[in-house]
Image (cartoon, rainbow, N blue to C red):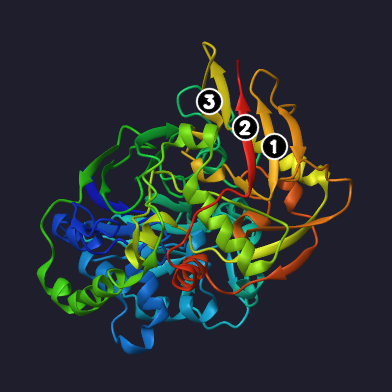
Amino acid sequence: MRKEFTIYYTSDTHGHIFPVDYASGQPEASGLLNMASVIKKDGNTLVLDGGDSLQGTPLTAYYLEHRQDWPIHPVAEAFRAMGLDYFTLGNHDFNYGYQTLKEYLEAADAVCLCANVEDVRGELALQKETVHVLENGLRIGLTGVVTDFVNVWEAPCNLEDLRVTDPFEAAKAACGRLKGRCDVCVCMYHGGFEKDLETGVSLSDSRENIACRLGEELDFDLLLTGHQHMAVEGVELAGAWAVQPPANAGKLLLIQGELQENMKKGFPKGFHSEFLDAGTKTSAEPYARLLPLEKQVQAWLDLPVGSLKEAIPPEGKLEAALRGSRLADLFNQVQLEATGADFSCTSLGNEPVGLSEAVTMRGITAAYLFSNTLTVLEVTEEVLRDCLERCASYLELRGGKPCISDAFLKPKIEHYNYDFYAGLSYTFDLRRPVGSRLVRLALPDGAPLRGRTYRLCVSNYRATGTGGYPALRDCPVLWQGSGEVQELIKKYIQKHSPVPVKRNGEMNVVWE
């Protein structure tokens, strides 16, 4: 006797509810509301999500800032339209603190499963695991865990009443409790793969991503991953079937499985998974309920902020790393004025983006993608050298020509982990080995740093040492801001329009 089941799985949708590209204001085939029209649900179907739902678009940012004016939670409403049954939390879902997370969980119709998040207050609607019995009698055991690097990245104030514990140990314990109670054991893991899925070669010794270990050492049948924004349609990990959808609600995964009576563990042969496009049709009823919020967001995005003296065209990633970035120069100007630091560093998103001469909030949110605040660290010359060597590793020579290193492209594209500095003059020599490429470091006037300590402005993300900058992790914190960088950019442009963008310091790269 054969019993079948279907799972629709999304992850890392990052606030993409409506089918729109907010940078351009143009329609695109994406969004939870479009996904809702793709899903065909019956009594043998589950809809699951792997987290990172609250952060990522101007819509969710605007809603969270003005949520007292809106009775409907847009993310919860969109997932309701999809028929979401269970979900886990992603690292970005902690960005806005306990109360915001509580409101989201209370608004959701679905059950949140996150076995490695402990609620000190005991007010969050969280469960460690559950067994869902389908119409055909199949028992689906489900649990969820989130990468514990939340503890590294998140502002301490957002975790005061929460404990994010070891995801492997929590998943192991949940798996042990589920086995014997279910026919199929499923783990939703907001984390990715630490090994190359083709060669098995380790890609990192960090514990940020442990999906391969979960698949190899624990007895899950199905491993639903996320966080890395990789498109993994299906791969076997020591008998477990693992998948991962790409980010931003452009595609969802359809996973079909079957279980035959007396079949011991017929996986992965019992699984088939494929990507489905979000499509171009929008679920009408929730669209109408959320449309007033969307219209207000679009009007807010088009409000004029000020102007630049000259437009900044989109900058290619390689060209910016070799010659410098005017967009990064602007962000560093903003950060230095906001903090009074000696030096500043900033990063850019994965896609080339510019900024028009006439600046709107749409332009700012497209150019600066992150929900970051600022931190000022006390740093030494040694720390600066260590960080700049990490930046220099972004580039490598192939056939005598510079290109971007695979270390920043695989398994996940991470252009945002290359930093542009202001207040310093420095030179990288790509002919030298990684770790010894910084051949000149001085102040803008050419003076040496002379061994004293300095104030370096970084994002709260970079201050944790994330992205390959561990030297920053232990630096004394001199100041922490609460205002998000996008808002600081807006205020700076309002104050100084028309804004001249100037380079503070000098960056050179040599390879010939």
**In the displayed structure, would residue 306 be above or below residue 13?**
below
Q: Tell which tag, 1 or 3, sits nearer the viewer.
A: 1
Q: Which residue is drawn at the image coordinates 49% and 69% (left, top)?
A: 496
Q: Which residue is drawn at the image coordinates 60% and 57% (left, top)?
A: 461
Judge left or right: residue 283 versus residue 179: left
Question: Looking at the picture, which amino acid does disc 1 mark?
Answer: Tyr
Residue that badge 1 annotates = 426
Q: Are marks 2 and 1 in contact (CB under 8 Å)?
A: yes
User: Where does the C terminus fall, quadrant-wise?
Assistant: top right
* Cα separation between marks 1 and 3: 38 Å
Mark 2: secondary structure: strand
**142 vs 153, nearest the viewer:** 153
Q: Sequence-wise, which precedes: disc 2 or disc 3? A: 3
* Cα separation between marks 2 and 1: 6 Å
- Dot 2 surroundings within 10 Å: few (below 14), some, or many (20 or more)? some
**In the displayed structure, would residue 35 be above or below residue 245?**
below
- Dot 1 surroundings within 10 Å: few (below 14), some, or many (20 or more)? many
Using the image, tell me which numbered label, if any, was put on residue 297: none
Question: Looking at the picture, which amino acid does disc 3 mark?
Answer: Gly
| Residue 24 pos. (x, y %) | 25, 56
**381 vs 49, nearest the viewer:** 381
User: Where does the N terminus fall, quadrant-wise?
Assistant: top left
**In the displayed structure, would residue 378 be above or below residue 400?**
below
Note whether residue 266 is visible. no
* Cα separation between marks 2 and 3: 37 Å
Judge left or right: residue 151 versus residue 215: right
Question: Looking at the picture, which amino acid does disc 2 mark?
Answer: Asn
Q: Residue furthest right?
A: 451
Using the image, tell me which numbered label, if any, was put on residue 200: 3
Using the image, tell me which numbered label, if any, was put on residue 508: 2
Q: Tell which tag, 2 or 3, sits nearer the viewer.
A: 2
| Residue 391 pos. (x, y %) | 63, 37
